[in-house]
Amino acid sequence: MPTPTTARPKLVPSPPQFSGKLFRVPEVAEILNIKEATVRKKVLLRQIGVVHLSARAVRIPQSEIDRIIGEGFVPAREVR
């Protein structure tokens, strides 16, 4: 007779810990002097960490902006 197996809990990775104020995409684009589309693309490529408020709404924490600037980010050119 087969022995009953005990259910193992699924391992769920803990979400990254962010700190500081939360910014909207247009605010981050202005701070970094890049286009909003570039910020959205980097979010989709997971190059910028975000906090999801709903299925569509995201906010970018101050710690991510500090990380990007600290890595030596320089925009390619002036935003028009």
Image (cartoon, rainbow, N blue to C red):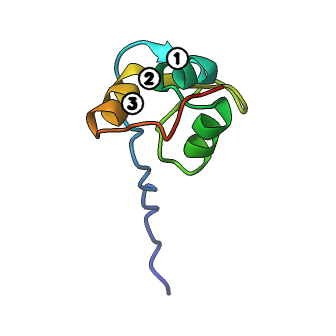
Position of residue 29 measured from the top left corner of the image (x, y, whole percent):
56, 25
Identify the mark at residue 64; answer none if there is no mark: 3
Position of residue 66 measured from the top left corner of the image (x, y, whole percent):
32, 26
Number of marks? 3
Amino acid type assigned to the residue bearing label 1 in the image: Phe
Q: Is residue 14 above or below residue 64?
A: below
Circles 2 and 3, Cβ within 8 Å, touching? The answer is yes
* Quadrant in which residue 38 is drawn: top right
Position of residue 64 measured from the top left corner of the image (x, y, whole percent):
39, 30
* Quadrant in which residue 71 is drawn: top left
Q: Is residue 74 above or below residue 1?
A: above
Q: What quarter of the picture does the C terminus occupy?
A: top right
* Quadrant in which residue 68 is drawn: top left
CA distance for labels 1 and 2: 6 Å
State which tag comes first along the sequence, 1 or 2. 1
Amino acid type assigned to the residue bearing label 3 in the image: Glu
Identify the mark at residue 42; answer none if there is no mark: none
Q: How many residues crowd mark 3 within 10 Å: few (<14), some (14–19), many (20+)? A: some
Amino acid type assigned to the residue bearing label 2 in the image: Pro
Circles 1 and 2, Cβ within 8 Å, touching? The answer is yes
CA distance for labels 2 and 3: 5 Å
Q: Which residue is mark 1?
A: 23
Q: Is residue 37 above or below residue 46?
A: above
SS type, badge 1: strand
SS type, badge 3: helix
Spot the residue most to the top. 21
Is 13 displayed left or right of 71 in the figure?
right
Q: Which residue is mark 2?
A: 61
Position of residue 79 measured from the top left corner of the image (x, y, whole percent):
60, 28
Residue at x-position 47% and y-position 46%:
47
Q: How many residues crowd mark 1 within 10 Å: few (<14), some (14–19), many (20+)? A: some
